[in-house]
């Protein structure tokens, strides 16, 4: 995977190791265009709890650590400041780097042979003699199993199914690819016996605790409340790729694994899950923790 990951990114952060990161891809990784003082506070907190501090948490090996980059001098005040968490943001424009604007839109603008069908849903992959040769598509609003008009699109070389963690297994199962019992229950003829389709789905659980902070703490509450002055200044700054529009408000963070005592305290159900997925994979974090100011 590393060669493909390197091909997608332009890494603007401090780790310039070409073995790990790419520097010519369409997706930009930077600090964004806005700073916050809460980075230093998180750094002190995690140090007191015994967590390791690393300069690059995205090297596919680091885990159970927090990323706080080296102190950089502030030449105006003479003080040092910890650098913040990297983000998928272009440092020149301040805009988020996303797949459509980085991969799809530029190709369409070139007038190449990429055709994007909007409001269209893939009903199934057409498989002939054990090979995927095309797809059948229907209008996006058409219910499954309806008599909506079907359009067949044939492939000259291959079919790539990339529809996310939920959409991809649905397409495969509608195409007859999956576990026998699942397909039988849905009344679909099995074409490929592949029991792993649609299994091991893990939800994106998210807990967002809110805290009261000291009055002098700088937050983005006024931005979230829609304060006109703050929004106007944000738009002016954003013209230069800076300001509150050029950040996702995540200032620092870490990838965390529980201790043996914590695993035991969480009970046998979690312990079984931990033993199966995490115990022998020290590079796999159980949780991502970050701090934001909005």
Image (cartoon, helix red, strand yellow):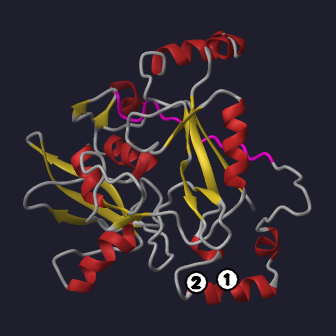
- Assign the N terminus to one quadrant of the image: top left
Secondary structure under the numbered disc 1 in the rendered image: helix
In this figure, which residue is indicated by the disc labeled 2? Answer: 238
Percent from the top left, x then y, of residue 207? 71, 42
Residue 194 at x, y = what percent? 28, 29
Q: Residues within 10 Å of mark 2 (few under 14, many from 20)?
A: some
Reply above or below: 104 against 203. below
Task: Give the residue at x 78% y 65%.
Answer: 219
- Residue farthest toward the right in the current orientation of the protein: 215
Magenta stretch, overall SS: loop
Q: Quadrant of the C terminus?
A: bottom right
* Label 1: few (<14), some (14–19) or many (≥20) C-alpha neighbours in 10 Å: some
Kindly identify the residue that appears in the image at 24 percent across and 75 percent down. 115
Q: Where is residue 243 shown, x and y percent of the image? A: 63, 77
Left or right, residue 279 beside residue 33? left
Is residue 199 one of those drawn in magenta?
A: yes
Q: Which of 193 and 76 lies nearest the eye of the viewer?
A: 76
Q: Is residue 66 above or below residue 158?
A: above
Q: Are marks 1 and 2 in contact (CB under 8 Å)?
A: yes
The x and y percentages for residue 73 are 57, 62
Question: Is 5 on the left or on the right of 64, as rendered?
Answer: left
46 vs 165: above or below: above
Residue 131: say if magenta.
no
Q: Secondary structure at mark 2?
A: helix
Residue segment shown in magenta: 196-209
> Residue 293 — which label?
none
Horizontal side, residue 268 vs residue 96: left or right:
right
Left or right, 166 with respect to 248, comes to left
Q: Which residue is mark 1?
A: 234
Spatial CA distance of label 1 from label 2 is: 6 Å
């Amino acid at each position: 995977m590393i060669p493909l990951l390197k091909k997608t990114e332009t890494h603007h952060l401090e780790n310039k190791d070409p073995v790990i990161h790419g520097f010519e891809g369409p997706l930009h990784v930077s600090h964004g265009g806005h700073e916050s003082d809460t980075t230093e506070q998180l750094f002190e907190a995690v140090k007191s709890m015994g967590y390791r501090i690393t300069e690059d948490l995205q090297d596919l090996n680091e885990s159970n650590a927090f990323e706080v980059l080296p102190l950089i001098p502030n030449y105006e005040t003479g003080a040092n400041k910890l650098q913040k968490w990297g983000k998928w943001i272009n440092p020149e424009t301040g805009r988020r780097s996303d797949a459509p604007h980085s991969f799809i839109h530029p190709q369409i603008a070139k007038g190449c042979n990429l055709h994007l069908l909007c409001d269209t849903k893939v009903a199934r992959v057409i498989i002939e003699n054990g090979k995927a040769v095309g797809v059948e598509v229907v209008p996006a609003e058409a219910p499954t199993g309806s008599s909506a008009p079907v359009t067949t699109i044939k492939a000259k070389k291959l079919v790539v199914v990339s529809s996310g963690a939920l959409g991809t297994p649905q397409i495969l199962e509608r195409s007859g690819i999956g576990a026998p019992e699942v397909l039988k229950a849905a009344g679909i003829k099995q074409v490929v016996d592949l029991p792993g389709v649609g299994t091991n789905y893990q939800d994106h659980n998210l807990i967002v605790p809110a805290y009261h902070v000291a009055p002098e703490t700088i937050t983005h509450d006024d931005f979230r409340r829609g304060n006109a002055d703050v929004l106007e200044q944000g738009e002016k700054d954003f013209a230069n790729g800076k300001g509150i529009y050029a950040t996702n408000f995540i200032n620092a963070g870490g990838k965390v694994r529980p201790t043996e005592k914590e695993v035991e305290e969480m009970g046998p159900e979690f312990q079984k899950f931990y033993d199966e997925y995490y115990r022998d994979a020290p590079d796999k974090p159980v949780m991502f923790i970050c701090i934001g100011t909005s």
